[in-house]
Image: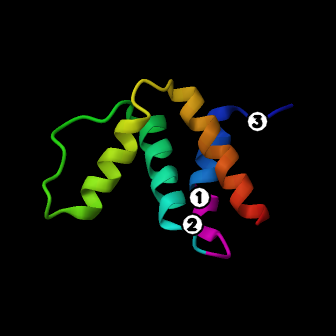
Amino acid sequence: MAKSLKSEFKKASEDVKELETRPSNDTLLELYSLYKQGTDGDVKGKRPGMIDIKGRKKYDSWAKIAGMETKVAQQNYVDLVKKLQKS
């Protein structure tokens, strides 16, 4: 029987911490935004100011996928983690 998406997503969120090589910054932002969209939905709050460069990039990355359904974001996250484990 196939695993539920919820359990696959949870496992992927644990597996990502055990990757052999550190993903690129762009890939890390993609992982972050998919995870947040898959757990919290659309981004909320104000965009961080110019001084908070890291926070601003994370916010912008998450905002780009606003409107994506939770299940789609979770599946994309699982797929990306699996791809990273193979490389």
The numbered dot on residue 2 is none
Q: CA distance from mark 3 to mark 2?
A: 20 Å
Kind of residue at badge 2: Lys
Quarter of the image for residue 63 reads top left
Give the foreground label among 3 and 2: 2
Is residue 15 highlighted in magenta? yes
State the image coordinates of residue 61 (x, y, percent, origin top left).
39, 46
Q: Residue at x 17, y 51 (%)?
A: 48
The mark nearer the N terminus, 3 or 1, is 3
State the image coordinates of residue 13 (x, y, percent, origin top left).
57, 53
Q: Residue at x 32, y 45 (%)?
A: 60
State the image coordinates of residue 20 (x, y, percent, origin top left).
68, 75
Mark 2 — residue? 17
Mark 1 — residue? 14
Query: Is the Cβ of the residue at disc 3 closer than 8 Å to that at disc 1?
Result: no
The numbered dot on residue 3 is 3
Q: Which quarter of the rendered picture does the N terminus lie within?
A: top right
- Magenta residues span 14-21
In the rendered structure, the answer to whether residue 2 lies left or right of residue 27 reads right
The residue most toward the bottom is 21
